[in-house]
Image (tube, rainbow, N blue to C red):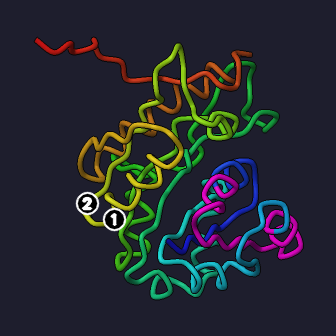
């Protein structure tokens, strides 16, 4: 797969480093020097601007802060630049610690989408793209684990979207990380994934281990 990252922060580093071993990965961002630095670190196929990353990738990972998504789309060349692309939204519409609205262990939602989610908002901004919500429910240090396991159990990575072909590709990327992909349905269920992530984020801001996760556990089914 050809994967273009928009962003070069902790989440981009964790995911791109794992995928670069078997896929062609391109790092793009507003600061091309920072993009190049990460590209060298993970031995990526290349680096450059946001527009370069979108042109390169068949799969685009939106790894910017949630409040920078609209600017990233414009810097990529607008909605038409994403036409036909699989776009993975890994963001959550929450603040970061230290902001003017931050209290210890608290968070807030700075972007309002009415009854919708950030992923649905992105889908409306780039209607020609195939949006999949995934990788938003864990902090970057979890994706650095090889594989992410907890008490001997695989991490179950939940994802959703409206395009079955796009979701199949995302499931393959999840499996490569050593996780179990579970499709929760249409993109409208991204509202639940984002809300669930807020619970994890609240725990993290309160001082819990950064590898704290919500994992889907079911009893072992033994053969008769």
Q: Position of residue 139 (x, y in %)?
A: 64, 36
Residue 105: within the magenta?
no
Is residue 25 one of those drawn in magenta?
yes
Instruction: Give the quadrant of the C terminus.
Output: top left
Boundaries of the magenta span = 16-39
Q: Quadrant of residue 62?
A: bottom right
| Residue bearing the label numbered 1 | 166
Q: Relative to residue 74, is residue 34 drawn left or right?
A: right
Closer-to-camera residue (171/72)? 171
Query: x, y percentage for residue 18?
Result: 64, 52
View extreme (front): residue: 224
Residue count near mark 1 (Cα–Cα under 10 Å), binned few <14, some 14–19, many ≥20: many
* Depth order, front residue of 136/106: 136
Mark 2, Cα crowd under 10 Å, few <14 / some 14-19 / many 20+, is some
Q: Residue at x 47, y 60 (%)?
A: 88
Relative to 167, say whether 126 is above or below. Answer: below
Q: Which mark is residue 162?
A: 2
Which SS class for mark 1?
helix
């Amino acid at each position: 797969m050809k994967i273009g990252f928009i962003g070069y922060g902790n989440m981009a580093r964790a995911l791109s480093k794992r995928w670069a071993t078997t896929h062609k990965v391109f790092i793009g961002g507003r600061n091309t020097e920072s993009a190049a630095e990460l590209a060298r670190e993970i031995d990526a196929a290349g680096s450059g601007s946001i527009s370069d990353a979108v042109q390169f990738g068949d799969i685009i990972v939106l790894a910017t802060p949630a409040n920078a998504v609209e600017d990233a789309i414009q810097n990529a060349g607008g909605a038409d630049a994403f036409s036909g692309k699989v776009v993975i939204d890994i963001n959550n519409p929450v603040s970061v610690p230290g902001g003017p609205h931050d209290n210890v262990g608290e968070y807030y939602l700075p972007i309002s989408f009415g009854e919708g989610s950030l992923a649905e908002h992105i889908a409306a901004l780039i209607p020609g793209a195939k949006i999949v919500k995934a990788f938003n429910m864990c902090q970057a240090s979890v994706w650095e684990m090889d594989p992410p396991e907890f008490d001997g159990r695989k991490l179950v990575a939940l994802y959703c979207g409206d395009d079955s072909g796009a979701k199949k590709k995302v499931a393959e990327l999840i499996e490569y990380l050593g996780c179990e992909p579970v499709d929760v349905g249409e993109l409208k269920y991204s509202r639940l994934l984002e809300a669930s992530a807020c619970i994890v984020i609240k725990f993290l801001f309160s001082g819990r281990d950064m590898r704290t996760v919500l994992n889907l556990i079911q009893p072992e089914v033994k053969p008769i």
